[in-house]
Each structure stands twice: as structure tokens, then as C-alpha cells.
């Protein structure tokens, strides 16, 4: 499993496009994986015949775990010992040196009956160097004892953290990884409650997370995008002091402007929606008040004001909420902003957003109105200072030119980090966005 960027530690295999016996070429897509940020297609770094698929679809594995064996025809003998080779990673990431085999960790010399057991164990059969060893069925080996009598537990830091979070004692976990290393699956299995003994023959097991007939609960594994979103929101909610302000706005003129823009030739083939004008209004407000487009550097105890705007657009997908961003959105003319917004949302809903497109955001817009919601108190994305929520547009009674009339009305809500943005600044930003949406024609900057 390669690291597809930004130091991600694991990924779930969604589906395989090849099977044992298939011929593959270099850069041929062999599987689709889901990281904590997006679904990514993996190309093959080798050409040859698929010898074995080592990890079935639906499993989450750590970066560096063998997932497929490809026979490239070079042969070789594993008994020759570890050999330094050039590992072929994903296209565009360059080559890096890697060892084809991990040297086993030194273990203390066994004593007494343990020495006899070791002596009686047959030597492992040689395995070809170009074909990784398929994982064996889970077996609970006897833990190695240290000089002080403690049990030596082999597990990577992410696995140790998972065990701590789940309350699992690693000394009681049966390792299935290579060289006796405990994997994430080992910890998750150990955390599952033991099934009660059945008086009769048990029925066929249901898939993980499934709710059978008459079941009162359903358990859904939290992984991939949902897991990353949950962690990010908890971190933001309990780190940044949130303040949310609300503003009701008459957007009747904005709706008329949207209809007129759809008729203009420069918007031909593009989706023009009220969200486009909300995004442009926020970009204009950022130009006027750049301090709202900032981040908090806790280590340096500094506020970092960004002189560029990577505008995040929250999008609901089957895998959960993702927030890709339009790079340098402040430089885009309105037709280009519409094109980028359309492409960004379509890619996100298809689950094809690249990890790079979901990093580096500076301020975000979320459209809760598409769900029939008037307003909300959105949580700020980590590393940003503010997020603007745009509610549904409804026909409401409104005082217009001194008389009661039915107008198109929406509610804007701005959440901001009170460490960076005080009430005055947040109120000015929200006020100006609202003013631009009330009368977009007279706001020249909205079209720049």
C-alpha cells in the first residue's frame, strides 16, 4: 500500500480491477482505495502476471503492507537474504530506495523447553523474491519474554493508538502480521465482544455492520472520509472558540440576476446558481477584510493572514462530507469561478476528489439550503478562521419600500474563530455579504 500523499497512514481497498492470472502493464489501474480524504485509483508499478491478491476488498491496511503480488519474470531466491532495490511507487512521486524484505527483529534466546520447540520447528520454505508472501491464517504465537519478564509487543504507533482508544491490551492480542507484528485488524477483532455460546448450530454470519431481521441496532464502521471528517470536526470544535452570527437577507434581486446570467453567452453550458453569487460576495468581502482569511499558528503564537483565497465548498457525498477548494479563487472572473465550482462539486459527488484538492483551504462556504434548512451553526474547518452557511431561499413576508410584500428571503450564518476574528470584524463581513446579495448590480466588485 503506497502513501498517496500527505503522510496518510492507512487506506481501505474499495475494489480490485485485476485477479490472479491477469496480465498487467506499468501504470495500469489495478484497484481503487479510499484514504482519509478521497477515493484514489492505484496504478501498477510493475508489468507481469498477477500472482495473488493479498488483501480482499473492504479491508483497511497500513501504508507499506503488501496488497498484491506480481510476477515480473525475474525469479530469485528468498534465501539469498534482503536485497536493496529501487521501489517503483505511484506515477509522479519519484523512485525511492526500499528493502524487499524486513530483517526480523532480534529476540532473546529461548530457554529450556522453548529451545527444544524452536529446534523442532522446520525451516520455512523459500519464497521467490518478486512475489510477496501471502498472509497466513491468524495464529496466536507465544509472546516473546524480555529479560525482566515483560511481554514484547510489536505494533506500529497508529495501531498502538487504536488499541489505546479501544481499551485493548496489546499483550492479549494474537498478531497476524509479518514477524509477529500486530495489525489494525487484530486490534479491532480483539475489541469486538465475544459471541455467546449457542445451544444449537449457529446460523450463517451476517456481513459486518449489517442489521438482520428484527435487529434493534446496526453498527456502521467509521473509516475513510467519515473517520477523517469526525476527527477534524472534533479537533476544530474543541480547539477554536466558535462564534456564529445570523443575518436574514432579501435576495429577490439576486434571483433575478441569476436568471439573467443564465442567458449570457459566457455562461453557456455552465450551472449558474445563487451559490455562485454567494461565493463571489464572500470573496469580495475577504478582499475588503483580509483578516477573516487567516489561520492560527499555535506554536509561534501568531495569526497568519493569507493574501490568497482557496475557497472551500462543502459537498455531501455517499462517503460523507468533503470540502474541496478552488485554488486562488480570488483571481477568477465570474464565468471561470462558475466553471470551477461546477467541476469541483461534480468531482466530489463522484468520489474522485484528489487529496491535494482538499488541503490548503483558507475559508469555506456550505450550502445547507439544498437540504431545506434555513440556517445552522457550521463548524470551522481546521486551519481556517471562518465558514459561511447559506440557507434555503423562501417566499416570506417582507417590508419592501415601506410596504409589506412577498420577497425571496434567505438566512446567512457566519461561524468564526474568536481568537482571530472579533465580533466587529465578523459582523462587517456578514453585513457586506448580505448587502451584495440584496443588490448585486450596484456592487461593482462582485463582477470583477
Image (cartoon, rainbow, N blue to C red):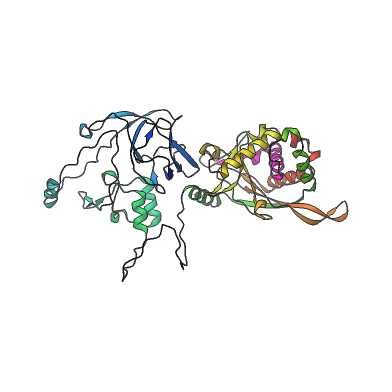
Is 59 on the left-hand or right-hand side of 343?
Answer: left
Position of the N terminus by quadrant: top left
For residue 72, which quarter of the picture? Answer: top left
Residue sitting nearer the eye, 280 or 148: 280
Q: Residue 438 in the image: state x and y as whole percent.
A: 78, 46
Residue for point 45% across, 42% down: 33
* Residue 323 visible somewhere in the drawing: no
Q: Nearer the viewer, residue 384 or 341?
A: 341
Q: Which residues are magenta?
A: 270-296
Residue 95 makes an appearance in the image: yes
Q: Quadrant of the C terminus?
A: top right
Q: How many marks?
A: 0
In this picture, residue 67 sits left or right of residue 255: left
Q: Quadrant of residue 27?
A: top left
| Vertical order, 305 against 320 (above or below) | above
Query: Is residue 263 toward the left or the right of residue 295 in the image?
Result: right
In the rendered image, residue 359, in percent from the top left (x then y), is placed at 54, 39
x and y percentages locating residue 148 in the rendered image: 21, 51
Left or right, residue 412 beside residue 198: right
Magenta segment: does it hold 255?
no
Q: Quadrant of residue 273?
A: top right
Q: Position of residue 392 (x, y in %)?
A: 70, 52
Amino acid at each position: 500500500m503506497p502513501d498517496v500523499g500527505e503522510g496518510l497512514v492507512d487506506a481501505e481497498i474499495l475494489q480490485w480491477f485485476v485477479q490472479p492470472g491477469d496480465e498487467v502493464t506499468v501504470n495500469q489501474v489495478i484497484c481503487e482505495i479510499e484514504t482519509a480524504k478521497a477515493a484514489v485509483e492505484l496504478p501498477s508499478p510493475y508489468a507481469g502476471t498477477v500472482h495473488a491478491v493479498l488483501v480482499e476488498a473492504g479491508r483497511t491496511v497500513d501504508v507499506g503492507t503488501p496488497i498484491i503480488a506480481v510476477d515480473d519474470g525475474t525469479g530469485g531466491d528468498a534465501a539469498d537474504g534482503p536485497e536493496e532495490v529501487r521501489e517503483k511507487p505511484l506515477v509522479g512521486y519519484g523512485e525511492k530506495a526500499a528493502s524487499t524484505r524486513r530483517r526480523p527483529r532480534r529476540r532473546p534466546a529461548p530457554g529450556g523447553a522453548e529451545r527444544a520447540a524452536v529446534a523442532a520447528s522446520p525451516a520455512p520454505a523459500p519464497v521467490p523474491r518478486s512475489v510477496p508472501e501471502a498472509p497466513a491464517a491468524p495464529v496466536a504465537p507465544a509472546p516473546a519474554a524480555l529479560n525482566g519478564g515483560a511481554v514484547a509487543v510489536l505494533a506500529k504507533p497508529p495501531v498502538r493508538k487504536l488499541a489505546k482508544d479501544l481499551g485493548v491490551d496489546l499483550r492479549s492480542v494474537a498478531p497476524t502480521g509479518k514477524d509477529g507484528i500486530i495489525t489494525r485488524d487484530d486490534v479491532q477483532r480483539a475489541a469486538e465482544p465475544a459471541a455467546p455460546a449457542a445451544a444449537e448450530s449457529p446460523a450463517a454470519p451476517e456481513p459486518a455492520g449489517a442489521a438482520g431481521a428484527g435487529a434493534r441496532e446496526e453498527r456502521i464502521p467509521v473509516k475513510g472520509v467519515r473517520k477523517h471528517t469526525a476527527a477534524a470536526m472534533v479537533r476544530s470544535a474543541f480547539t477554536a472558540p466558535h462564534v456564529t452570527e445570523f443575518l436574514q437577507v432579501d435576495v429577490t434581486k439576486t434571483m433575478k440576476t441569476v436568471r439573467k446570467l443564465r442567458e449570457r453567452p459566457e455562461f453557456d453550458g455552465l450551472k449558474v446558481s445563487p451559490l455562485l453569487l454567494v461565493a463571489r460576495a464572500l470573496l469580495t468581502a475577504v478582499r475588503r477584510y483580509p483578516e477573516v482569511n487567516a489561520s492560527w499558528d499555535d506554536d509561534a503564537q501568531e495569526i497568519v493572514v493569507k493574501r490568497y483565497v482557496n475557497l472551500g465548498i462543502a459537498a455531501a457525498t455517499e462517503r460523507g462530507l468533503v470540502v474541496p477548494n478552488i485554488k486562488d479563487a480570488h483571481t477568477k472572473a465570474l464565468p471561470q469561478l462558475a466553471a470551477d465550482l461546477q467541476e469541483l462539486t461534480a468531482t466530489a459527488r463522484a468520489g474522485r476528489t484528489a487529496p491535494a484538492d482538499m488541503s490548503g483551504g483558507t475559508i469555506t462556504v456550505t450550502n445547507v439550503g439544498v437540504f431545506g434548512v434555513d440556517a445552522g451553526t457550521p463548524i470551522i474547518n481546521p486551519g481556517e478562521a471562518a465558514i459561511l452557511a447559506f440557507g434555503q431561499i423562501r417566499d416570506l413576508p417582507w417590508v419592501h419600500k415601506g410596504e409589506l410584500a412577498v420577497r425571496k428571503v434567505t438566512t446567512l450564518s457566519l461561524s468564526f474563530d474568536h481568537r482571530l476574528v472579533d465580533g466587529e470584524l465578523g459582523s462587517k463581513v456578514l453585513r457586506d455579504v448580505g448587502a451584495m446579495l440584496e443588490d448585486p448590480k450596484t456592487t461593482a466588485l462582485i463582477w470583477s
